[in-house]
Image (cartoon, grey):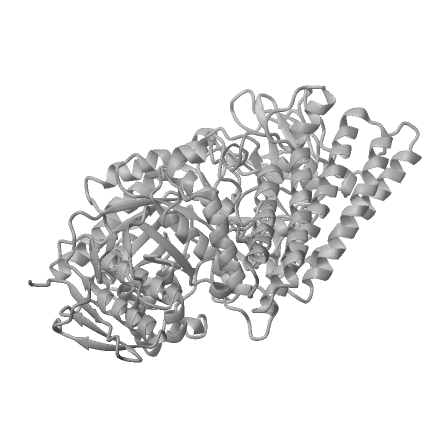
Amino acid sequence: MKYLSLLLTVFILSCSSKNKITIVSDQQSPRINFGIEKLTEALEAQEYEVTLSAEKPDQESYILIAEESDSLDKEGFKIQSDDNDITISGADPSGTLYGILELADQITKAGSIPESINLIDRPEMVLRGTCIGLQKTTYLEGRGVYEYPYTPENFPWFYDKDLWIEYLDMMVDNRLNSLYLWNGHPFASLVKLDDYPFAVEVSDEDFKKNEEIFRFITEEADKRGIWVIQMFYNIIVSKPFAEHYGIETQDRSRPITPVIADYTQKSIAAFVEKYPNVGLLVALGEAMNTVDDDVEWFTKTVIPGVQDGLKAIGSTEEPPIILRAHDTDAPLVMEKALPLYKNLYTTHKYNGESLTTYQPRGPWSEIHKKLSSLGSTHISNVHILANLEPFRYGSPDFIQKSVQAMHEVHGANALHLYPQTSYWDWPYAPDNTEPRLLEMNRDWIWYKAWSRYAWKSNRDRNDEISFWSKQLSDMYGTDQESGSQILQAYEEAGEIAPKTLRRFGITEGNRQTLLLGMFESQLVNPYKWRVYPGFYESCGPVGEILIEYAKKEWENQPHEGETPVQIIDEIVAHGKKAVEAIDKAEKAVSDNKSEFKRLQNDMYCYDAFANFFSEKVKAALLVLRYSYSNEITDLDKALPHLEQSLAYYEKLVNLTKDSYLYANSMQTAQRRIPIGGDDGNNKTWNELLPHYERELANFKRNIERLKASKNGEIDRVVEEPWQPVEVELLTKNKGFYSLKSGTQIYNDEGAVLEKIAPELQNLKGLKFIADSQNKHGTKIQFKTDKQVKLIIGYFNTDQKRFLFPPSLETNAAGNTHGEAEVILANAITLKDLPRINIHAYSYGPGEHTLSLGKGRVLVLGFINANDAETSRDVGFVGKDEKEAVDWLFY
């Protein structure tokens, strides 16, 4: 018999004190050889004497790994025993590898080769991947978001081969088969172009190091059946390239230019020529503005670049390209691209940039369904996890149901998994330990759970409880019952952050750090903080947000679905049960005691957070009731809840001040909720405590002022007008207009000013033609010798003829000038047009250009840099709307 694949022969000598095993292989497949190494280690650990041979010895008993089987699905394998003989078949080298590793695992578990085995297995999801961000917690000096060259100074861990081996071994142990490397513009660190030699961002020495480590990573990954995928954003160019041509590295409003397209196409071609087996993940959004540009860039720059690289090496085998659906019309892009390139995949965020539900629905789910219906593989991306940082998360039940939803609701058949925490600080966990914990080790259960259900999602619940209880009892050296108590703690705590964010959050994105809490102003007036469109409709079951619930309560209307009161009751119960369960297990712990104490502390943190948040919501409900009743007694009832909330937060501060370095690993101005993370500030609970104390003090003061007033109302402070400043305008406009009632700002009859916030009344707006703004956008060039702020008015609507305000969910550079937040909400009303919210763009001395996208927008002039420091809701609302009551907390 001729063996085309791998032949393993096992012969046990009964008269010997040691079992002797001969492993026979006539192949040089890197994956099969890696499997042999792992099998050898497993056998030797059980005191088998292992011999390697190229030929089958004449033995009676053997383990045969046969040639590839057409009857098995991709990556599938079969292990069968007949008397003393065992046969392993694989569908492909990866399937063969997984079959060998399965046998090795069973040998390790049982302490010997199993006497009888009959197993056929395969993964359900065709791609099961994790990602590593070559990113940092803060921006590099002189660079924008995502701009991090591959250097030992920026990423010392990137060159640590032992670390890579540990991570790749973790991946193959979990049967993960894809690794995504995320970076804004990796090409200038990995390839050199004859036409653009100046574009390289690293030294010759570092370039050689990058070549060596990249080849090492891809080769070691391939041994383990792992496909490496390099991600990049569009359009971002290298810093030296940008400086050479006098342009910005990234500019969302910039049109595609020939030189940028040529440089990018040649960069991609050089990368494919150098690394033909590495896939590409293309993010069209965030650094490009229009869908037309997205289509053109993908079909005329990215795909031709890949094809040029293939032509250079004489290959016709298309490497896979993954199209990211974020901030683009992915179905349209795929429609235009599929005739040009066949090996395309799509990916879209599962719950956005958080984990909120296993019942996804709404417009975001429709995107998944459209993409999965194209016939190509659609990948579900569990992205960022902004609401889970930094506490440990490991609810197998929630994760299993989420993977089932990926299949059943979205039609996805692949997984792209982010780290549970510390994406921006990889490879370290956020815990305050010395030495620092590695994220992959701290969050082992995160990877194990997602990969287990990506392999097979429909597993029996009772069996899963037993499985995970055993995993945890082994981890902490307890009995099975105590393991099940630790599992219960994980699963109870695992409901708290998802339920809280989906019912009370402003966004699912990394703009919000949920576990630092929220201000009352954000609970009672969320839309001032710009709720991300589609969030409430997509990231949880049908239900009501707080302001809807309060209105229905006042009007005695029936409630629908999941309610805020239901959720706060549930999260408090979850926190209590998590603490009770983890405390019950404590006495039985004999292994990894330090890690158990950290896990236990996380359960205490979740419990304190749940109570803190619950009390805030109770206070907010009474404040919202006051907005209808005008009864100060409602505010009196709210006060004890806000005080109790602060007490729970102080407990949270004490639990975290020595145990955690930060709550969120992204420590930049992209974080805005509950408060800005500018310059690495406001990243711990201790830093947030004074802000919550001030909120309580303001609330008390305003209640007393209301009680002291004669009619139950207080005269609010009359805001002083902002002071306009002169700058040198370098672009032409159609003149100026005063911000006075009755002024017509566009030629159409409806654009007449009615109400204007007092802060704005000294300003002069720049006139523009509405049709021109809609067709070409708005551009302002100016020169200033001082610090100034440019005041922009965005219409509060989602109609496409109006320019949308900056959105950090889709434009990571959308707060470069401090423009992301609403400074004055509901600040201007115009006849027959939507209300206006005011944003402020900060600029230093020099010459500047602000290019805004297509759609109507108001340019209201320049003010002193020290003005517009305090945000508020001016309150110009419709006659059937209630004025916001967030002023009670300012």
Q: Position of residue 165 (x, y in %)?
A: 37, 71
Relative to 553, is 623 above or below? below
Q: 139 or 584: which is nearer to us?
A: 584
Left or right: where 857 falls relative to 707: left
Relative to 678, is 745 above or below? above
Q: Residue furthest left?
A: 1
Residue 824 in view here:
yes
Within the image, what quadrant is residue 231 found in? bottom left
Quadrant including the C terminus: top right
Relative to 554, is 48 above or below? below
Left or right: where 359 falls relative to 336: right
Residue 194 in view here:
no
Left or right: where 414 falls relative to 309: right
Within the image, what quadrant is residue 703 found in? top right
Q: Position of residue 276 (x, y in %)?
A: 21, 60
**What residue is rendered at 52% in x and 60% in y?**
422
**What residue is rendered at 88% in x and 29% in y?**
712
Q: Position of residue 335 (x, y in %)?
A: 26, 36
Q: 229 or 61: which is nearer to us?
A: 61
Quadrant including the N terminus: bottom left
**What residue is rendered at 14% in x and 58% in y?**
67
* Badge count: 0
Q: Residue furthest front?
A: 15
Q: Position of residue 90 (x, y in %)?
A: 21, 56
